[in-house]
Image (cartoon, rainbow, N blue to C red):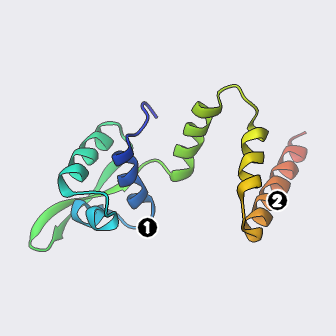
Amino acid sequence: MKKKLSKRQLDVMKVLWDHSSPMVASDIVNGSPALNINTVQSCLKVLLKENLIEVADIVYSGTVLSRSYRPLISRDEYFNTEYKDIIGTSSTSSLIAAFIKEEQNASELERLEQIIQKRKKEIEEIR
């Protein structure tokens, strides 16, 4: 990813990430109360230029033909890039420990534990 997303660009991406199918600009506006159509269209233009989204299709939105968009980068890929920028050369374990300390959902902690065990197993198999 070339540059950090603005708050509004991130709002648009969140709406796209939360939907499994491509969306037109008016649907994106309906997906977030913080957005208006002019903001969404401006953000879509930048996100297209940065190759973070693509035009999925041309579809009818009411009686008008409109572009529908889908993300080219996943939420996890974006987060991975952002957290590496934030922690820099700091320990990843410090960041994860902070997340764990704040987590209130036991099933989420169990899921994290399973992910760690799976990754340990993968590393052992490589050796």
Residue pictured at 80% horizontal, 66% vertical: 110
Judging by the rendered image, the residue that carries numbered circle 2 is: 113
Residue pictured at 39% horizontal, 59% vertical: 16
**Depth check: 125 or 96 in front?**
96
Secondary-structure class at tag 2: helix
Which quarter of the rendered picture does the C terminus lie within?
top right
Count of marks, rendered view: 2
**For the residues marked 1 and 2, what is the alpha-carbon distance in whole angstroms?**
27 Å
Quarter of the image for residue 27 reads bottom left
Residue 68: percent from the left, percent from the top? 26, 60
Query: Image check: 91 left or right of 13?
Result: right
Quarter of the image for residue 3 reads top left
Amino acid type shown at disc 1: Ser
Query: Which residue extends farthest bottom?
Result: 62
First of labels 1, 2 by sequence position: 1
In the rendered structure, find residue 20 and report the number of the disc placed on it.
1
Quarter of the image for residue 26 reads bottom left
Residue pictured at 38% horizontal, 67% vertical: 21
**Depth check: 117 or 125 in front?**
117
Residue pictured at 36% horizontal, 40% vertical: 51
Query: Image check: 33 left or right of 82?
Result: left
Is 79 drawn above or below residue 112 in the view shown? above
Residue 28: percent from the left, percent from the top? 30, 62
Report crowding for label 2: few under 14, some 14 to 19, many 20 or more residues within 10 A (C-alpha). Answer: few
Amino acid type shown at disc 2: Glu
